[in-house]
Image (cartoon, helix red, strand yellow):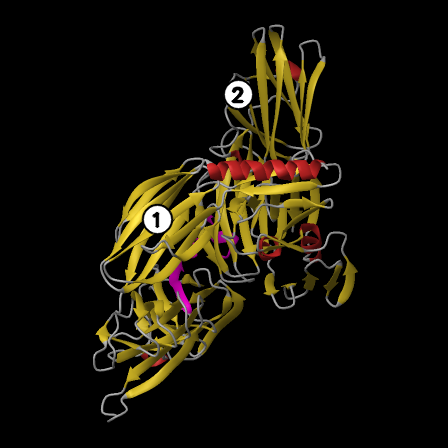
Amino acid sequence: MKKCIFVVTILMVIVLGCCLTVNAVAGELKVGEKQQSRLLLGQYHSYNFYCDETQYYEFQFENQSIETRINVGFADEFLNFFVGKMTVSVYDENEKCLAAKDIKCGYTGKIFLKLNKSTKYNIYVDSTIVGNYSVSVKKLGDAGGDTMENANIISASDKICAAIDAPNDQDWYFFETDNQNSFCDVEIENISGGYKEFTLYEYVSGAGQTPLKVLKDISSYSGGKNNFNVKLEKNKKYYVQLTSSAEGGYILTLDRSIDSVGDDIDEAHKIDLNQSYVSSFDGKDDADWIKIKTSDVDAYYDISIDRLGDYAYTEIIVCDENGNEVKKSNMHCSDLNINIKLEPASVYFICFSSTVTGNYEFSVDESKDEFTDEIENAKTVKLNQAYESAFDGKNDADWMKIKTSDVDAYYNISIDRLGDYAYTEIIVCDENGNEVKKANMHCSDLNIDIKLEPASVYYICFSSTVTGNYKCQIQELADSEADTKNDAFLIVMNQKYQAGIESKEDEDWYCIELPSKTHLEIVLLNESCSRISLELYTSRDMKLETMNMYSSGEGRKNKIFEDAGIYYIKVFGSKGNYTLSLGEYGKTVPTTAGNSKETQGVVGGRILLTIGEKEANVFGKIVSNDVAPIARNGRTMLPARFVAENLGASVYWYGDEEKVVVKNNEVEIILYINSSAAFVNGEKIKLDSPAFAENGRTYTPVRFIAENLGATVDWLPDTQQVLIVK
């Protein structure tokens, strides 16, 4: 009964609104001009359009208002009402409706009509809510010639909006290429009725009465699109023919891309080192060759190709000057690279190929090996300065030499593989070559926190099983803390203090003098993989606050101090570095420069995801995903590609089967949309949270994917974060 009353009420409101609808003449439409306006409640707009030529016209309407949804609850269900539809229509001078269209909020709609010369038309715009909109009109002329001999000239990169005059009419165009090989993306859009057929011809000189060779023949039904990619030869003439079973408009788009490199090793295009180039593939038969000459010194070279967003099987081959293969790499991916040591002052040929057409960017970058392979010839490096070098493989061990400062200090020794994921090792030795500390991990970056003796010589060795460039740094962290409360280090507000815990028995004490009524904020940044804790005391040893940071990340505490006095802070825990700052609540100096997320949550081979946030910390770098992780059935769900590819796996989507496949050299994982059954290397496993599709994306359980790829996963409930460690 209540539902009926409500529905009747809604209908009465709608009827009353219609009765109160008022017309407002918004103006006159002209070809090529855009009208912007705003509709008020109970109002509609009308426009006059005078047609000066019998032709096809395109009317475009943009509904810029925001959709409103009303939910009305009853005992057992909800009734949903959507408000925000815009209705547009075109009438002739006799007020006969020629076409009408409903356009939802935030969408654009088009009407295509053939209009008669010297005739007035009325365009009406009506909406159920207040909102902005725009309207424009464009003429679609007969741009093509009626025969091959009368074909109109266009370019190989062009866009033509035109119309077929009558059934079985023909539109002809032609264009000529220059002295460069290229390929062309061609798209035909049928924007009105009829069945349109498109044919691309190559003009063959001296072929007599049939000089046209068919290259491609496609068709497009009413309202549809079709496209293809074709290779164009240099210094050639090409003809385009369009026919239709009925009169109507079309949009023809040609997008030519220059193939800037040769198709054969003998035609290899010479390029400069350390410079980016853009070229294109025309398909599986296109192999692009380039030629380089290496520098006069020993060096490593990073050869990379970026498919500019495309995901396809791609291959790189490196050959010596005699054409003998030196190295090959291939993968189903969007970008690919090879890092290789090449002989100095030598010529090499490089081939890029792919099974999919499209543009790509490539470069060959030189990286010199800054360091020697023996400890005896170790290069002296400066503290707190970054260096770049390269590995040539498992036999390359790069040694460097440092001298510590004259004060007690902790040192952070780090290596960043610049995106590569490989087994990496750091060894620290004293001046006699005795090993002091070693760390190794299969990761993209690695670091060691260590306390070294003052004014002493140490040797550091970086090594890896995989070739590639890397960046390294040895950073000094001054030991500004005291080990007992009686010797507590006096600190001041709004300053950063960097220090480190040497062992589980080590305690760092600080003290600060505060006035009464102070609202204090304490910020502790844990820069290690281990637990760091903080305790706050009064001068009489009464504990006021405790803060525990179990992994890398930033923690904050704020407290109001009613009484003036001296307060003490103790920092302790496992071995590792930290940064401490104190300040007035809301004005505390950040413990990290800029965005604190730069170091939050991740060191070494770690990924930190936050529920509801698109930004993630991947191996110490902030990376933005296109969607945020969400929680379903107590599980964190995210499109598989983001986690899997960062863990070194590939992801494939089979739309016909609604199947996701994640695989590396050791594991193959198969999941199906809305199925609780998954398969790992052929073994069936039951999921408590199946994969599902939402807003065009396929969400998969993060823990299931990560753990089957060899990672460990921890849930951090306080911060709603997932920590993945490889």
Q: Residue 329 location in percent, x, y? A: 51, 70
The mark found on residue 496 in the picture is none
| Front position in the image: 632 or 267 | 632
Report the side of 401 relative to 544 (left or right). left
Question: Which residues are the magenta region?
Answer: 358-379
Corner quadrant of residue 39: top left
Amino acid carrying label 2: it is Gly
Corner quadrant of residue 112: bottom left
Report the side of 93 relative to 374 (left or right). left
Distance of mark 1 from mark 2, alpha carbons?
Answer: 49 Å
Report the side of 474 relative to 243 (left or right). right
Say whether residue 367 is magenta: yes
| Front position in the image: 612 or 533 | 612
Q: Residue 612 location in percent, x, y? A: 60, 41
Q: How many marks are shown on the rendered structure?
A: 2
Q: Could you tell me which quadrant the N terminus lies in?
A: top right
Which is nearer the N-term, disc 1 or disc 2? 1
Q: Residue 84 location in percent, x, y? A: 50, 42
Q: Which residue is mark 1?
A: 135
Q: Which residue is mark 2?
A: 586
Is residue 284 visible in the rendered image? The answer is: yes
Give above or below for 22 relative to 478.
below
- Give me the residue at 47% from left, 51% from top: 102
Assign a secondary structure to mark 1.
Answer: strand
Amino acid carrying label 1: it is Val
Assign a secondary structure to mark 2.
Answer: loop
